[in-house]
Image (spheres, rainbow, N blue to C red):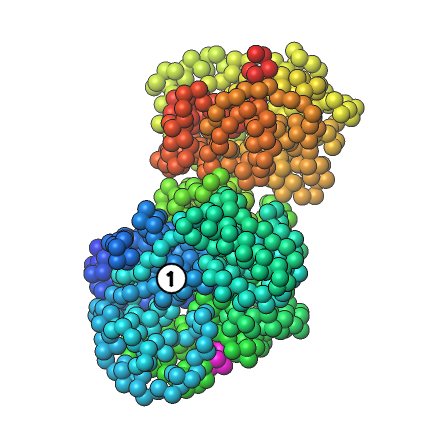
Amino acid sequence: MARPDLAHALAAAIRGEVDFGTSARALTTMDASNYRRVPLGTVAPRDADDVAAALAVCREYGVPVVPRGGGTSIAGQATGTGVVLDFTRHLRSILDLDPHARTAVVQPGVILDDLRNAAAPHGLTFGPDPSTHSRCTLGGMIGNNSCGSHSVAWGTTADNVHDLSVIRYGGEPLRLGDGAGTVPGLRELIDAHLAPLRTRFPDLPRRISGYALDALLPERERDHGAGLVRAFCGSEGTLAVLTEATVRLVEAPKARALAVLGYADESAAAEAAPGLLPHHPLTVEGMAADLVTEPAGLPRGGAWLFVETGGGTPAEVRTHAERIVRAAGADGAVDGTVVTDAAAQRALWRIREDAAGTATRMPDGREAWPGWEDCAVPPARLGPYLRDFRTLLTAHGLRGTPYGHFGDGCIHVRIDFDLLSPRGVAAFRRFSEELASLVVEHGGSLSGEHGDGQARAELLPRMYGDELVGVFNRFKDLWDPDGGMNPGILVRPARLDENLRFAVLPSRPVDVAFGYPDDGGDFSAAVRRCVGVAKCRTTEAAGAAVMCPSFRATGEEAHSTRGRARLLHEMLAGDVVTTGWRSEEVRDALDLCLSCKGCRSDCPVGVDMATYKAEFLHHHYRGRLRPAAHYALGRLPRWLRLAAPFAGVLNALARIGPLAALAKRLAGIAPERALPVLARERFGRWARTRGPEGTVILSDDEVVTLWPDTFTEHLSPEVGRAAVRVLEAAGRTVVHPGRGVCCGLTYVSTGQLDKARKVMRRTLDRMGGFPGDPVVVLEPSCAATLRTDLPELLPDDPRAAGLAASVRTLAQYLEEYVPDWTPPRLDRPVAGQTHCHQHAVLGDAAERRLRERAGLTGELSGGCCGLAGNFGFERGHWEVSVACAEEQLLPSVRAAASGTELLADGFSCRTQLDQLAGRRARHLAEVLAEGLET
């Protein structure tokens, strides 16, 4: 079978997209597991007819099929070697929502949060809520029988599905609500094996492993067809392809409270969890201190239970939660608190929901992996199981951080397996076999939420015995006699130590420019940070979050942080993306990366795609002609220095339309953009009239260095002048390093890293006279570059680390060094933008506190303005740039009341507002300085 022939046949048979190209294949080699399988291509069907036609073609060609939703599966079941059916592009509609019947009819690509948002106005929700609720699909949830934190109240996905429409391999449609007779031979198979079906399934709420054939027992089919629907849930794409589901909705509590209970350790918390179930909570979630980096809001303890209550009024839920705290105190809790504020609850839940990512790194930076992510035991056995589990880890010299659904006896954990060496992989197998036996000894299930996939399916005979596993095999064969549905998963599985995604990576570190200090200098390790939990694929930026603006603008996997990391992984592997650093596929995916650095802070594992992009561009264009924008915008500091004496003339020429159009064309600038106006007087020239510039000064608490960044120096010197007035009002003498210093930002963002290092070294030479003194940097992107890129590009120069440590924003400096200074009282509302680099690298807590002290009320927008330095100016980026601005920034400004102060500390943010909204925003320094004059 030739791949082009199959692709042609599929394209002729369906209306949706067929893509057998390098990028499409590379983007779907992995899910969120340890496994990697390379598909032939992808199909994005538009409707059920497309699904049937694609399955018919694949059967004709003898090619396997794997259905894929959000790609967040942790056991490898969303990877495959044939054709991947991508349901996230088209089949994502809510076809019906009946609030009276409390049901919804959905397509498989519907995002869970979209369903919950649609149900919310009716006071309803979908009960199961895995931590990936902002990007996981209903089809994937049904395929894995997902659960989530509220399963103690509302059960698993299987408990909340009424009917399913599926299509078998080959194209035959079935409606499972019609009963077991829908699949010929199924009733006979069940009747022939009643004894093992009645005795070999452990009785526990989170038994997800294997097929749920006990749901087909005659005594359990209370409702016509319900058993077959339930047995299909958790089948991991191995039986048929889901095209439509009727799901049940539950009443959403009008009010919620969170009882947070502290215990001495995780075993004490685990043993206490079952005793809380009679209080009928919505959740009983647990985690230990080694998972919490900032324990703000948590009571005393070494481990905690999150016990949520729901009801009709705030008073009711608070009373319920307080009753739980009292009961827990009598049963071993060392502390407890009740949280009723919605924002505080979200902040605490965020700690828990990000655990799937944060747990991938040990405190010492060592990598930790899934594989034994979600075993479950009877809740009453959880405490003893955890102690035995810890003992087993120690015996194997391993570490892990358990957390999860303590009320259901289900534990999530990432373990620091060595999956890079043959010896480590062999140890992984030995541990897996012993842990499987331990789980069974405690009456448990190898999977309590995420399914067996390839990670655990090989060990199912230890749990169910050979006879029942044989029944599983025959059950699949009744549905899929040709074996085309997701082979190697759940039944007749590949070995748990095959297809590991790390095996294809280089065995030695590749030569790179950045230091990657958190990854041992290894670019492969940096790329491995992406474990696929796909928080970057959310369709809305929550609160102040930034990641990933380009994905939200395009909806394309290739433009998500995860997608780009996958392409880089395959570039390093070399068998799908075969052209290495010269790869056009990787270049095209990175082209729409705004280098906003949002992933550096918002990604649970700290992927830093801005750095990876700069690294790639450095290698990709080495010794080659670059895009025009790299020369024009990437070397902006140089051009602005040369242009400064002619600012008036150049500004006049820029107002002549044909000349401006020609200049933009030659410079690779988007024709829709207006050219910035050059300052008639540089900030540095003005500053010299205020005091001496110098290269050596004595250390003095009253002196502060003000960094003359390129944007303040040449494009917005009014910001620098305002900052000087504020600092002088705070009793400081301001000095500036003078000419010749530059952070190198524009060189870094365009991947001109050799030039960036040269500029940075020259800057360090110039700044040598300021050892250890604080340096106030007004432009957030320049501050972030000095704080992170400088020491990572010059890791062997101690001066780089010293300068990085000295960097402060204006608000940070005032708070740290002049804490008694009282800002002018301004008393007005604000709107605008928190710079994405500030959010990601510097934080904005000091700015928030300073605004509050000055009487500036209201929140600034999250997300990214979309201009992002050179990105929004480059030709071909206009549409995405505008889409990013339209997500949060522009709507918030349009909605601002008259008299609202527009704040934006970043030059890009101010420029975007000026060019798209016709509104002038100001740096916080300007607003404070104006207040000093009144």
Residue at 45%, 66% (x, y): give it: 449
Q: Residue 35: tell me if it is visible.
A: no
Position above or below: 620 against 532: above
Residue 289 is left or right of residue 128, and the answer is right
Residue at 54%, 20% (x, y): give it: 826
For the C terminus, which image quadrant? top right
Residue 124 is left or right of residue 691, and the answer is left
Q: How far across and down, in percent of the image, does residue 610 sit?
A: 51, 42
> Is label 1 in a helix, a strand or a loop?
helix
Which residue is more in the foreground, 114 or 585? Answer: 114
Q: Which segment did they paint magenta? A: 457-463
Q: Which quadrant holds residue 391?
A: bottom right
Which residue is more in the foreground, 740 or 306? Answer: 306
**Residue 733 lies within the magenta run:** no
Q: How far across and down, in percent of the image, does residue 540 sit?
A: 40, 44
Q: How far across and down, in percent of the image, does residue 182 sit?
A: 22, 75
Residue 694 is left or right of residue 710, and the answer is right
Considering the whole magenta stretch, tell me its main secondary structure: helix
Q: Amino acid at mark 1?
A: Met
Which residue is more in the foreground, 796 or 205? Answer: 205
Per the image, the residue denoted by label 1 is 141
Which residue is more in the foreground, 694 or 545? Answer: 545
Neighbours of disc 1 within 10 Å: few (<14), some (14-19), many (20+): many
Q: How far across and down, in percent of the image, does residue 414 sit?
A: 56, 63
Residue 170 is left or right of residue 754, and the answer is left
Number of numbered discs: 1
Residue at 41%, 31% (x, y): give it: 892
Q: Residue 796: tell me if it is visible.
A: yes
Position above or below: 800 against 200: above
